[in-house]
Image (cartoon, coloured by chain):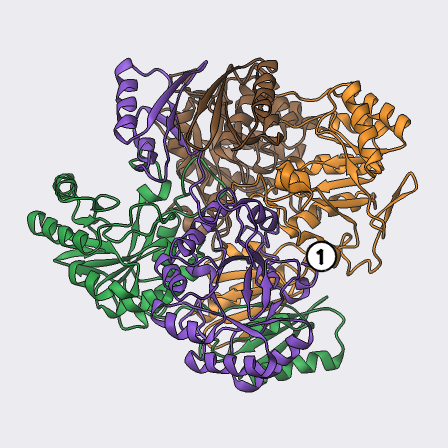
Chain colours: A green, B purple, C brown, D orange
Amino acid sequence: MIIVLKPGLTKKDETDVLREIKKLGYRPHVMRGVERTVIGAIGDERTHQSLETLASWPQVEQVMPVQKRYKLVSREAHKMTSTITVDGKVIGGRKIQVMAGPCSVEDEKQLLATAHAVRKAGATFLRGGAYKPRTSPYEFQGLGLKGLKLLAKARRQTGLSVITELLSEAHADQVAEYADIIQIGARNCQNFQLLIAAAKTGRPVLLKRGLSMKIEEWLLAGEYVLSNDNPNLMFCERGIRTFETYTRNTLDLSAVPIIKQESHCPIIIDPSQGVGRADLVTAM
Amino acid sequence: MIIVLKPGLTKKDETDVLREIKKLGYRPHVMRGVERTVIGAIGDERTHQSLETLASWPQVEQVMPVQKRYKLVSREAHKMTSTITVDGKVIGGRKIQVMAGPCSVEDEKQLLATAHAVRKAGATFLRGGAYKPRTSPYEFQGLGLKGLKLLAKARRQTGLSVITELLSEAHADQVAEYADIIQIGARNCQNFQLLIAAAKTGRPVLLKRGLSMKIEEWLLAGEYVLSNDNPNLMFCERGIRTFETYTRNTLDLSAVPIIKQESHCPIIIDPSQGVGRADLVTAM
Amino acid sequence: MIIVLKPGLTKKDETDVLREIKKLGYRPHVMRGVERTVIGAIGDERTHQSLETLASWPQVEQVMPVQKRYKLVSREAHKMTSTITVDGKVIGGRKIQVMAGPCSVEDEKQLLATAHAVRKAGATFLRGGAYKPRTSPYEFQGLGLKGLKLLAKARRQTGLSVITELLSEAHADQVAEYADIIQIGARNCQNFQLLIAAAKTGRPVLLKRGLSMKIEEWLLAGEYVLSNDNPNLMFCERGIRTFETYTRNTLDLSAVPIIKQESHCPIIIDPSQGVGRADLVTAM
Amino acid sequence: MIIVLKPGLTKKDETDVLREIKKLGYRPHVMRGVERTVIGAIGDERTHQSLETLASWPQVEQVMPVQKRYKLVSREAHKMTSTITVDGKVIGGRKIQVMAGPCSVEDEKQLLATAHAVRKAGATFLRGGAYKPRTSPYEFQGLGLKGLKLLAKARRQTGLSVITELLSEAHADQVAEYADIIQIGARNCQNFQLLIAAAKTGRPVLLKRGLSMKIEEWLLAGEYVLSNDNPNLMFCERGIRTFETYTRNTLDLSAVPIIKQESHCPIIIDPSQGVGRADLVTAM
């Protein structure tokens, strides 16, 4: 951690900061520049108490982290690229897996027709929501257990593996029973209790990026899965919220090389949510 | 709902759209403009199936909602300003209620000292986290039940009412037992199952705005509380995420007149989260 | 234009709005819905006075444009895809043109070495700044005319065509003398006097997207070039400003299919500005 | 400047970085942490060549500036709060100056009526556009010189001082002849040639914040005015662009305490542009 002091401090002001840094278990290293004094605090920021509280001290101009806060998802800790195998299909390998299906499972006819169609078009996973998080309480909230059973039926008929969303800790076991991959949606990406519950089912977890989630926050949310003994995590970029209104979201394709650089976990792209317009999905 | 058609459609293209509008239960009303044909679909968008699916039709340029999607939180439905009374303190009335306290409950000494200090400074509610949602799994996650008990002790000593965050459906009863107001944090603002669980405890609910939550989405999230038979909802603006990095968040003070105009529910401002810098809190 | 009225208006309130719509030259068309009355105002929004002023009337809830405000850049007006030919190189055709070079022209040695290197790597255009817009007045502002002459020298030696930025109306003739394509930078994307000055030189114009420019604003800025008798406009996506701090900008690749759909003008991608990190450019 | 090295470098990799830092005129100071090596580069970042180029070196993880890049606008350099006196009216003092008027000057009758009305309501400055930057070339671009003359007439009749926008270097002398304060609009906030031209007229300059301008960029744009020998600069917050669509912009009121803390120059608030809705202006 780097601590930048305000200019014009007294000797005592500075000593107080140094004492606090030592108290929190770090070794301070002072550098005097032209206008600012800078302190490097040496120690592992993940095993000691955070130095961020120093940011509110009147002596301190800013506190800048140097170390990365994520560990298990990081490529530094795990040089090899991880893959996840579901029913013999390898996610994160050379072959691209296509996950497709309806937004929500509406009825048997719709689901089976869609499942057969996407399989024919090359999809290997069937994606459909049985539990749906809806902006408005007046919208259709999904078929629940009945929807999960229809997904299982579609799997039997088509051989597609099933990915579906979990949105309540209370449904974790039920969803895990029917799903081959558990999806955590954008709105629940920092619902950490849900992430832990999903991790504990043992099923692979697909973690969507939140609408205004920084890459670092996303990696740290993923850390909740890996640190709860579930190594099978994949990230999913699905568009971020920006000022642009032509599209529903702005698909941030730079997330692909970034996640590959920072993490060993696979990354999935959701172009249909990502732009929110059917006419742009193919191009994206 | 207003449906704008693309230019240059055939008669049949147009008829297909009109038929679909009728099928979904609306009465179409066609207006022919200079370059575009526009259809007004007349009917209650909350009781009929949504027309938004039309947006993906090749004939349709855009679908624009006219009606507001929120109902119970709306001032149209409830002209009088609502107030919420907790231990005789009126929230949403002429007197401003001050809610203050530590970010998280750390130990008895810290909490009691803070509680006495904020009470002396004029606060009427003690705010402190017993369960903490943390970006990183390696940060302190709160004292849990022990923290709730300390909050209750501080209430007995100071007369301050207690507001604390609920972050798991599984804790709803426990938190409701100790809290006078249940806080739903920014990260869980669209965790609808949690909103329902909070509503069902019967305690007043303070709903923080999400980091990138539009006003309409916020009002609709509030609708989940009121439509689950809990009339005691208050909104809390706590800063939104923007491109600016000088502050942690951008406190959107326009939320105050907007919520007062659109809703009858009280609005609270959290200036410390809102800017994320101690030196700016007083000014904000 | 669609005008949504507030609920509960008197007959007179409504009549006043209708009278104003007629006064501004439009034909009003009233639709009564379940909760709202909606007026369609029929007439060309580009040749009549704008109805947007109605948005500030107390009777009016919102004013929603239906018609697209851009005309000459629009694909509706010009179905064929436009190409721009510079020294026999076709921009916007099947072959991709690569524009490369240093951020700023620093000296002869640097520029010539770079020019030869990028040509060898496949570039067909040399891009380099002689006039540089700098966030700080203390940074290097470019070599000016001397830089333009060096670019011309590099062109003679390599056969690469030259694209360079114009940032002042006062330099328009000078820059046009040396440049094959005039670049308008992100910071000047709505400096309309500069756009007009660039258009009037007769050189092809490359218009970068502003940091927080909506697609519609970008197309309208391009309209300033075409409506000043210069048909040779190309758009350039160079990343937008979002909350993400891992990259300098978020490259919005959805701009490619969108511009192709909305406009007949070519679109260029600037991946290096777009992410602002050398290690991600190749992937993007 | 702080340079964070990537983990796992060879001795030679590190030496190369140290050599470059020295070559650019800084004194390097090495700190070895638990996982990362950090180098403090000591020297004035404004008088030496920038170290930011190091960010693209493969050895370097990040480059973090410590020093503030603005100087003349900074409160560090000028502890006393600056005021600007126009016709005996003090801007930046205890008394608040109200600047009001029409968006654009349309005709004599409209302008004089508005001028008298705003004066009666307490305004001390008349604000109106003679040259208007318009998103679309088909919108009214202002009366130009004729508008400036009308503003002068309104000043004679009412005693209000005049503030009006400059949007082309070519108009600098003309606008300065009629205006008491020159306004630089949001779209031209980083049109540095225009800032220099405005500064050189000697008139006080009001610099609006750009739609997606960070505080630091705004201060640096102001630095262009002060470093061109014009001490009479005032900043104007007018709302930033965010994801929210309920308002036209998000008025960032935290800009007031921030500018007061960072700079000695006055700060003005434009609540009507800031929210873009007449019904919210009074509250803001």
For the point 55% across and 82% down, the residue is B156
Can you say whether C101 is above or below C280 in the image?
above
Of residue B172 and residue D45, the one placed in the foreground of this image is B172
Q: Secondary structure at mark 1?
A: helix
- What's the residue type where badge 1 is placed? Pro
Q: The residue marked by circle 1 belongs to what chain?
A: D
Which residue in the rendered view is the most extreme toward the right?
A: D88
In the displayed structure, A22 sits above or below A236; it is: below
Q: How many marks?
A: 1
Quarter the C terminus of chain C occupies: top left
Locate residue D189: give its quadrant: top right
Q: Nearer the viewer, residue B166 or C73?
A: B166
Q: Look at the image and tell me whether residue D190 can be seen.
A: no
Query: Where's residue C28, x and y in %?
Result: 51, 16
Q: Position of residue D274 (x, y in %)?
A: 64, 42
Give the camera-side residue of C227 and D121: D121
Horizontal side of residue B131 vs A38, given as left or right = left
A15 to the left or right of B28:
right
Front one among B165 and A200: B165
Q: Residue at x 33, y 44 (%)?
A: A273
Q: Position of residue C273 (x, y in %)?
A: 50, 44
Residue C197 located left or right of residue B41: right
* Residue at the disc numbered 1: D257
Considering every residue shown, the one lying at the far left of the view is A157
Neighbourhood count class around disc 1 (C-alpha, 10 Å): few under 14, some 14–19, many 20 upward: some
User: Which x, y percent locates residue C195?
Assistant: 60, 26
Q: Is residue C138 visible?
A: yes
